Image (tube, coloured by chain):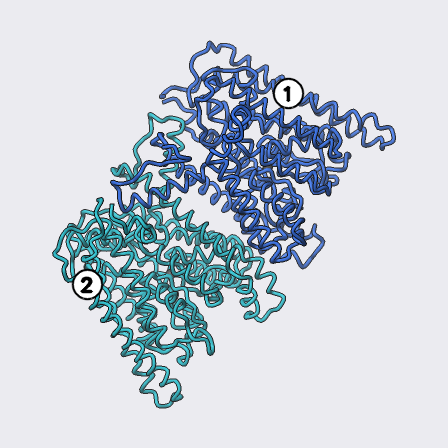
Chain colours: A cyan, B blue
């Protein structure tokens, strides 16, 4: 459509989203009350908490100011259609804006990533993007010290998971509807080839998604509380699980609870969070047979079962830590497989200590991801099913071009003639982004990042051996951020974090996390000059 | 074409190729003479050499027998057209047959891969496929001991490079012509999208390719001899260079000569070997301006220049071995970049000792490869140029579907509408093969392979640190065989070899080397049942 962007519309929608983000910050404020009321605590701590409250209020003020200005700029908007281009711009820019606005509470409260090391704005953006994109990677080295990370900031951090899992634009459409415009925007935000048409009105779809999502969060919070968590921990971990995010409120992540019950509960809800929510809705109406008829769900279950068995087999054979007997092997193996496959990234075991098969298969699983239409990130199971079928078809086409059968998925013929091409283009694009980012990282990231990690582990001899892993560590860091997993191998392993990386690398990760969460084209087009030009 | 394979034609062509391979074994026989005539040598050595001569004669007998039987089976062939399916079958099966026939001299002579460790048939196939596919990976741990590797076998080993660089089917077409059949077969053998039409008759193209190739081999042999090599070494290293193969006759590869002159000579001829031979021919006729007008050649030169500078910069900054001053840095850096980019794989420096940028960039370069229509393996420079343009176009298409410009390469519009799709399919296929092979290797290859390598290096402490590299080493081994490079990182590094791997892994490498050398579909279709069925 050789037209310029409809900037009026763009400003209006972005303004509203900014107002929504600002308003949602209020939910974090009550969680300061216990810390402020706690007279037994050091006065310094309550001073830190007060600063965080002011930081949140200040951030809200900025959100309202930005939102007001944007809506003022867009006041001349008189309806008019919304094209694909506007939808992409709205989605891409919403996420950029959300990253910056979401970083404000961290930055203004001077949250500390380590002792006497206040967060930089890039690091605050990292934490904000990691939350919204449901990656769950962190630069904070000590979550349990309220002098370093105030309570309301810790809640805001998990709350960004809640918002990100729902989808910033889905939230917008659910609240305000937008007819066909909402449909175009939701398509530009939600990754994965999803079927449409079963539910005609898009606000309806968004509301169903939101209702299931909020309902599951509520149920899980209650279950966690019944299993011994406080309201604060229950909410934060429910957000982390249902958004497939992975932020915890403890340094040892979910493993800190040392509770098989909590871990098995989390496994069940991670699996649900990685399932297509439309399918969950249809199953609630039509019974569990719907689940088994879905080729993506069947494949998803097969992967969980097959990989868990393989991980247990090789883990026990190598006598890895956590694989002492069948019970612990099942628990640790299944937890980690589900955690990585659904892209949640919670850790209960340090899988970097596993045998090389275990480490390698988890690295590959990062690229699989959950089902389309779930809150899970990654490339999505259905894309892998289609990828396999397309490649099979291409090999067949090479030797009998005239007898090739149409592509069939789950017993139905695929009627979109462009699908095979778009699938291989998508894989090619992810490959190109992965390789290019890896090259940037190994080229520009100083070796000291590995030296620091080795020094932190307290073993001087480990420094060189750690640096030897640079190539693999960088690959895993790119994979873990691009697929919204969180932890990777080596310096970004389950017991480590992203604090040691340079500011430039952190900015790269912000970009990769955004690319992973939103429909990849909606972000890539932003850097194309032609996108912004008339003609 | 819903018809069954024309097996008569298949048998005939395969029979002729078998006869040609058998006949070409005679060239190895004369190189036994010095060893047989050497009275000062231990009688045991001349016994080993005699056994090798009988092995060669026996192998020739088997080739002639197989060729005769195949031609007898195909005697009823009465012309008839050759379809794409037959061309693929001929090319795929020729390479399988050549691998097996080429393995016979190694196996029958009981060549030893280590002391008292005679080669298995799988290992002989590895060495044969490595030669024909111009990979240059080896399982022989000591080339310089004539008790272990007889002279005529060492020549046969390098001679397979000569045949493989030319192309088994190109050789066939050059000698016998085949009209349109030859064209289809050559297309099924030569990887890379090449332009056709400038030279109508295919035998002519094949003859030109063969003439340039043989001429360059002859010139390089003379140059090497002028620089101090014997005829035997000159021929073997010329084959290794011009075929971008990389087999040497010394354990220290080309680095053993310790001669900057030989190394710079090799750099120049490796660059030539990685250039499109049709372009070389046109340059000889039309002058050097043709070279610079070619977008693939320009990109190829840019990669060599750019990567060499980067490798020198990071190598000197990290004070890597071989980067002591500008002169040695230039020599070692450029040699290794050209050696890997052109997929030759000669080593003069152990690049596994370099900094992580150097190791990482060489690992990536393995996937680039030489120019299409050269003897270089890998994915080819032009495919990367096209890949970049196709992805760029797709991102543009996502935001302005109606204004997308047609694909232009080197100032010309690409007129094949199927090209963008086939490029992304090719990248997807290589990705799938790479990932699947890597998973197989990390799953089934026992850890002892790494323990043995550490033990061989004489450092007990190194064992665990070496095993930590298993994931990266396996990735580099797959990359180095699939792209026909030869050496990789770690246990398959420049100073190592493939002897330590299990027999299953060696068989996997045989398969990967064949996939890399021949047009990938010609090999993949062989395992498809539908390929062999009527309908
Ligand atoms: K995550
Ligand atoms: K090679």
Q: Is residue B508 left or right of residue B402?
A: right
Chain letter for the residue marked with disc 2 in the picture: A
Structural crowding at the residue carrying mark 1, measured as other residues with C-alpha within 10 Å and reported as few (<14), some (14–19) or many (≥20): many
Q: Quadrant of the N terminus of chain A?
A: top left
Query: Residue at 27% across / 79% down in the picture?
Result: A30
Chain letter for the residue marked with disc 1 in the picture: B
- Where disc 2 sits, the SS reads helix
Mark-to-mark CA distance, 1 and 2: 82 Å
Structural crowding at the residue carrying mark 2, measured as other residues with C-alpha within 10 Å and reported as few (<14), some (14–19) or many (≥20): some
**Residue pointed to by mark 2:** A73
Q: Nearer the viewer, residue A146 or B361?
A: B361
Q: Nearer the viewer, residue A352 or B178?
A: B178
Q: Among all residues in the image, which is located at the extreme left?
A: A78
The image position of residue B201, as x and y in percent, is 48, 17
The image position of residue A332, as x and y in percent, is 45, 62
Quarter where residue B48 is shown: top right
Question: What numbered label is drawn on residue B22?
Answer: 1
- Where disc 1 sits, the SS reads helix
Residue B61 vertical position relative to residue B356 in the rendered view, above or below? above
Q: Nearer the viewer, residue A456 or B415?
A: B415
Quarter where residue B462 is shown: bottom right
Query: Residue at 49% across / 22% down in the picture?
Result: B90
Residue B442 vertical position relative to residue A493 in the rendered view, above or below? above
Question: What numbered label is drawn on residue B354?
Answer: none
The image position of residue B439, as x and y in percent, is 49, 47
The image position of residue A358, as x and y in percent, is 50, 55
Q: Quadrant of ligand 2?
A: top right
């Amino acid at each position: 459509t050789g037209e310029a962007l409809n900037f009026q519309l763009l400003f209006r929608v972005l303004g509203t989203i900014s107002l929504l983000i600002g308003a949602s910050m209020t939910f974090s404020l009550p969680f300061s009350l216990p810390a402020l009321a706690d007279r037994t605590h050091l006065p310094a701590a309550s001073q830190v908490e007060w600063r965080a409250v002011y930081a949140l209020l200040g951030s809200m003020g900025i959100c309202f100011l930005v939102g007001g200005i944007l809506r003022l700029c867009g006041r001349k908007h008189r309806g008019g259609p919304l094209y694909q281009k506007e939808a992409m711009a709205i989605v891409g820019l919403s996420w950029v804006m959300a990253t910056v606005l979401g970083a404000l509470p961290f930055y203004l409260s001077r949250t500390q990533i380590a002792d006497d090391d206040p967060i930089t704005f890039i690091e605050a953006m990292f934490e904000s993007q990691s939350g919204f994109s449901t990656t769950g990677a962190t630069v904070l080295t000590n979550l349990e010290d309220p002098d370093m990370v105030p309570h309301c900031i810790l809640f805001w951090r998990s709350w960004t998971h809640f918002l990100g899992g729902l989808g910033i634009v889905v939230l917008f459409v659910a609240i305000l509807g937008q007819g066909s415009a909402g449909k175009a925007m939701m398509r530009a935000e939600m990754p994965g080839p999803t079927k449409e048409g079963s539910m005609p009105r898009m606000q309806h779809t968004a509301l169903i998604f939101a209702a299931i999502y909020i309902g599951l969060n509520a149920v899980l919070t209650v279950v966690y509380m019944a299993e011994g968590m406080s309201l604060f921990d229950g909410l934060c971990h429910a957000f982390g699980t249902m958004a497939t995010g992975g932020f915890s409120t403890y340094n040892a992540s979910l493993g800190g609870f040392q509770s098989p019950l909590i871990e098995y509960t989390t496994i069940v809800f991670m699996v649900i969070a990685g399932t297509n929510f439309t399918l969950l809705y249809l199953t609630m109406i039509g019974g569990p047979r719907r689940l088994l008829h879905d080729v993506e769900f069947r494949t998803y279950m097969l992967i969980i079962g097959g990989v868990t068995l393989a991980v247990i087999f090789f883990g026990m054979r190598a006598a890895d830590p956590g694989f002492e007997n069948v019970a612990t092997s099942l628990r640790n193996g299944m937890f980690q497989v589900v955690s990585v496959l659904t892209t949640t990234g919670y850790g209960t075991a340090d899988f970097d200590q596993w045998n090389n098969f275990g480490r390698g298969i988890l690295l590959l699983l990062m690229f699989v991801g959950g089902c389309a239409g779930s809150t899970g990130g990654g490339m999505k199971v259905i894309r892998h099913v289609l990828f396999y079928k397309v490649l099979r078809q291409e090999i067949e086409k090479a030797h009998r071009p005239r007898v090739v059968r149409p592509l069939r998925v789950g017993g139905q013929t695929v009627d979109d003639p462009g699908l095979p091409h778009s699938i291989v283009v998508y894989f090619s694009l992810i490959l190109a982004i992965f390789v290019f980012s890896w090259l940037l990282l190994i080229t520009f990231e100083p070796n000291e990042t590995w030296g620091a990690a080795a020094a932190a582990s307290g073993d001087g001899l480990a420094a060189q051996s750690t640096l030897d892993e640079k190539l693999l560590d960088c690959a895993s860091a790119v994979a873990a951020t691009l697929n919204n997993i969180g932890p990777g191998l080596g310096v970004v392993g389950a017991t480590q974090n992203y604090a040691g990386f340079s500011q430039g690398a952190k900015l790269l990760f912000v970009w990769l996390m955004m690319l992973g969460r939103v429909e990849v084209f909606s972000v890539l087009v932003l850097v194309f000059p032609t996108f912004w030009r008339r003609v």
